Image (spheres, rainbow, N blue to C red):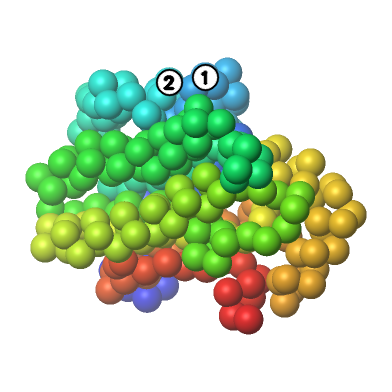
Amino acid sequence: MTRNNLFDLTGKVSIVTGGASGLGKTMAIGLAEYGSDIVVVDVDTNKAEQVAQEIRHRKRKAMVVKTNVTDKKEVENMVELVLNEFDKIDVLVNNAGIARRAKAEEMSEKDWDDVISVNLKGVFLCSQTVGKVMIKQREGSIINIASVVGQWGLFHPLDLASSYCASKGGVIQLTRALAAEWAKYNIHVNAIAPTYFMTEMTRPLLENKEFLSYLRWKIPLQRPGKPEELVGPVVFLASDASSMITGHILNVDGGWTAI
């Protein structure tokens, strides 16, 4: 690999969970623009197919697999389908996630379980199943989408999300554990920890003037992120440009964790 094509993903196969919308959609298309073929994994196949069409318009292969990432059998079936189509898996982006907002003392057990199941168990099941493939290949890159609130917590009354913070903290520690365990197989495991980005899930919060004012105080760059600003980080971690990086948490946070 020469220096002028360190970020080239041509010939690679990337799975993006939660790829039908939000940050997952942006990252899936971004990876395709750098040459990767894409597997869009989501429970919403209609939206996922729209993303796949956008990828095909960029002259890359795309397939859609409906998958509940909390169901081991569905995850195993997804991986089998991908291997039948592409024969390999180079990159896994564990992006699927949900949030349930409530005061900690009032949060229902179901809401807690739902968030931990999708955000943490789902990351483990996908990593475990894809990891077995990458171990046989003796190479691969797993990129987990964590959050700055998995490191620092959140102290604003408009976004009470103890379960979300706990799940993303778990993702960060799982990232480090898998990186250490699978390094001998040349599998790189890293995480991206974004601040608040404008998506369908965060729109109600970011359109609230009080919360936006809080973010401008909390983030040195004084604004939430734009989805396209995650393309560079995910391509970097998926490419040979990050060949000596594993177990790293890349904060894409406008300086949130610097203060």
The residue singled out by tag 1 in the image is 45
Q: Dots 2 and 1: beta carbons under 8 Å?
A: yes
From the viewer's perspective, is 158 left or right of 258?
Answer: right
Residue 142 image point, x, y percent: 32, 52
Query: Residue drawn 47% across and 51% down?
Result: 166
What amino acid is at disc 2? Answer: Lys
From the viewer's perspective, is 107 left or right of 124?
Answer: right
Mark 2 or 1, nearer chain start: 1
Query: Residue drawn 86% across and 49% down?
Result: 208
* Viewer-closest of 232 and 165: 165
The residue singled out by tag 2 in the image is 66
Residue 56 image point, x, y percent: 51, 32
Residue 240 image point, x, y percent: 32, 65
Mark 2: secondary structure: strand
In what quadrant of the picture does the N terminus appear? bottom left
Relative to 22, say whether 170 is above or below: below
Query: Residue drawn 67% across and 56% down?
Result: 196
